[in-house]
Amino acid sequence: MSNHLNFFIDGKWVAPVVPATLDVIDPSTEEAYTRISVGSKADVDKAVAAAKAAFPSFSQTSKAERLTLLKRILEIYNERYEDIAQAVSQEMGAPITWAREAQAWAGRAHMEATIKALENYEFSEKRGGTMVVKEPIGVCALITPWNWPLNQIVCKVAPAIAAGCTVVLKPSEIAPISGIVFSEVMEAAGTPKGVYNMINGNGPDVGQIMAGHPDVDMVSFTGSTRAGIIVAKTAAETVKRVAQELGGKSANIVLPDADFETAVRKGVEGCFGNSGQSCDAPTRMLVPASRHDEALAIAKKAAEAHNVGDPRSEDTRLGPVVSNIQYDKIQRLIEAGIKEGATLVTGGPGRPEHLNRGYYVRPTVFGHVTSGMTIEKEEIFGPVLSVISYNDDDDAVKIANDTVYGLAAYVQSQDIDRARKVAGQLRAGQVSINYPEWDTFAPFGGYKQSGNGREYADWAIHDFLEVKGIIGYGA
């Protein structure tokens, strides 16, 4: 509790310049369980100044020195693993088993991947008489979301440090406690002062100030497309680099030769994981028109197997969504699906019958969803699946690509060559065939309005570097 009202700036926990607080809500109870301080321009100026002062020396550290630091951070992270999982479970309502096995695990896995990538990363290359060097870009503003807090914090902080950058992190004010615990990890690991700074606050008062700050050299943002546009416009005034991982409406193409029982069931599980709050969730399931009703029967059974309840229970599979705002948005979209003529297969508006408080959403499946329906176009960010018919492979690809988003896509088939051909035609930054394991070394990022830049392992390190050519360097 001691650091909930403080920021971590220049190696110390400090109070905000102008005192202001915000309640943190437990979404399973709808009640505040702690408070955090929220920052202002004055706090941003302090944090950026600390990062700027630390950059000249930290940017000159050796790869070996930065590896030692990252390994120490990983060691402390593992010591605080249960604290991190508990924080995520309470702040965003993640079932505790999911918080341990997915949320906290993701941070650890990305730290491990960054360390391995850095061990093999080359920062210079001779090309004839020219030396090409990759240098840290500078002070980086990192703005992360609430839905995968540790995943996104580590995906930005670790590669930035690997590259030799200094950073200012703003976690989501909706789910900020895991970010505070992570900052305690960074302190305990002996991170040099000013290299890592953390302030809490909202988008307009802190995030936007960070994005426009003249002493910030790069902004890495994960969040909604709407907010990403604001960040990019703000950053444009100072012509800084902007990396964005934004929204998605990912298609999951189940080809006719797929094992339908497995493909549809896993598709539902993928859509509903994290209570449907993943930007790369397979929310549009595309099935052959002739097998649409078969797919709906399987999806109904799979959806109804998701027990919804208290995130503190080891047996709970689906917790609440993160906030009242999210809950209301999801309810509006479910109502829109019904109003516009989609078939409600299971679920629907309101909470599950056995729950009378908390932001719990009924696991919902819609069938016979057609092009142009609201639930077919808009990112819902809840446990809601839309099942759509297609006629042949070309039609499936056309429907899958008919979206402003392009973060992820999925293909299911027992014919690997056919699956590869379809995957090659999908306009998305990451395409998964037959539900593979999470690959923390694969590039992750979007096409179109899903963003730009790539995260994970060496792909992320590259995004935090500038490229310099020293001509006449010599043979």
Image (cartoon, rainbow, N blue to C red):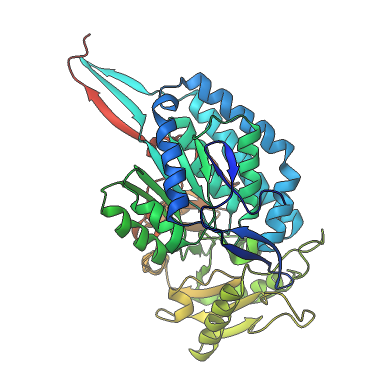
Residue 119 horizontal/vertical position (percent): 51, 23
Q: How many marks?
A: 0
Residue 405 horizontal/vertical position (percent): 39, 63
**In this rendering, position of residue 231 left or right of residue 144:** left
Residue 308 horizontal/vertical position (percent): 75, 71
**In this rendering, position of residue 2 left or right of residue 192:** right
Camera-side residue of 77 and 391: 77
Camera-side residue of 350 and 194: 194
Please say if 96 is above or below 320: above
Whether residue 221 can be seen here: yes
Query: Where on the picture, by quarter, is residue 264?
Result: bottom right
Residue at 55%, 88% (x, y): give it.
Answer: 338
Camera-side residue of 58 and 288: 58
Please say if 199 is above or below 273: above
Query: Where on the picture, by quarter, is residue 225?
Result: bottom left
Camera-side residue of 159 and 205: 205
Whether residue 293 can be seen here: no
**In this rendering, position of residue 281 left or right of residue 359:** left
Please say if 152 is above or below 386: above
The residue most toward the left is 472
Residue 189 horizontal/vertical position (percent): 63, 31
Query: Where on the picture, by quarter, is residue 54?
Result: top left
The residue most toward the top is 475
Residue at 42%, 24% (x, y): give it.
Answer: 57
For the C terminus, the quadrant is: top left
